[in-house]
Each structure stands twice: as C-alpha cells, then as structure tokens.
Amino acid sequence: MAKCAICEKAAHFGNAVSHSHRRSNKMWKANVKSVKVKVNGCAKKMYVCTSCLRSGLVERA
C-alpha cells in the first residue's frame, strides 16, 4: 500500500546499525497519503506521497 501512484516511490530496505555495530533489518516506508485528486476533470481517490503533493504534481479535488 505504501506506494505513490504518481512517482511510484515505495518502501526500501537496509540495515539498522546499533552503537555496537550490530546490524538488523530495517524498512523505510514512503510518506503516502490517501488524497482525492482531479483526473480528467473528475475526482479520484489515490495514494500520493507528500513530496508529489508539495511539488504540485497533482491537483486536489
């Protein structure tokens, strides 16, 4: 679910490294909001990341 419908930004994975340098798996999720967006003149609900919302790539309905 955490995937942007505009830029397709999704979760990515890596290692969380503690102070003693022990590594464990970590996941970073995209900051995705459920937003009503104008698509071809009509309103449609989709998941959009906040960077696309701030940059003006989508127009809210």
Image (cartoon, rainbow, N blue to C red):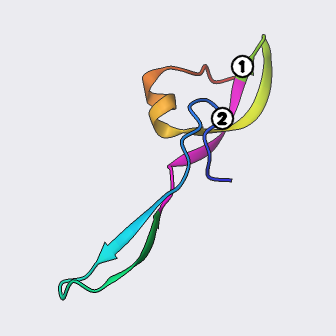
Mark 2: few/some/many CA within 10 Å (<14, 14-19, 20+): some
Viewed as shown, does residue 39 lie left or right of 33? right
For the residues marked 2 and 1, what is the alpha-carbon distance in whole angstroms? 13 Å
Q: Which residue is mark 2?
A: 5
Label 2 secondary element: loop
Q: Position of residue 5 (x, y in %)?
A: 66, 35
Q: Residue at x 53, y 55 (%)?
A: 11
Indicate the quadrant where residue 34 lies.
top right
**Quarter of the image where the C terminus is located:** top right
SS at circle 1: strand
Q: Is residue 35 magenta?
A: yes
Q: Nearer the viewer, residue 3 or 24?
A: 24
What residue span does the magenta drawing correspond to?
28-37
Q: Nearer the viewer, residue 58 or 60?
A: 58
**Is residue 6 on the magenta stretch?**
no
- Amino acid found under the numbered disc labelled 1: Lys
**Picture coordinates of residue 24, whole percent (x, y):** 39, 81
Q: Which of the 4 image quarters holds residue 37?
A: top right
Is 12 situated above or below 7?
below
Q: Residue at x 43, y 71 (%)?
A: 26
Instruction: Please state which of the two labelled residues, at mark 2 or mark 1, is closer to the viewer.
Output: 2
Residue 38 badge: 1
Q: Residue at x 62, y 52 (%)?
A: 2
Q: Amino acid at mark 2?
A: Ala
Above or below residue 49? Residue 23 is below
Q: Earlier in the sequence, mark 2 or mark 1?
A: 2
In this view, the residue in front, 22 or 33, is 22
Q: Position of residue 57 (x, y in %)?
A: 53, 20
Predominant secondary structure, magenta span: strand
Kindly give the residue lying farthest to the left in the view shown: 19
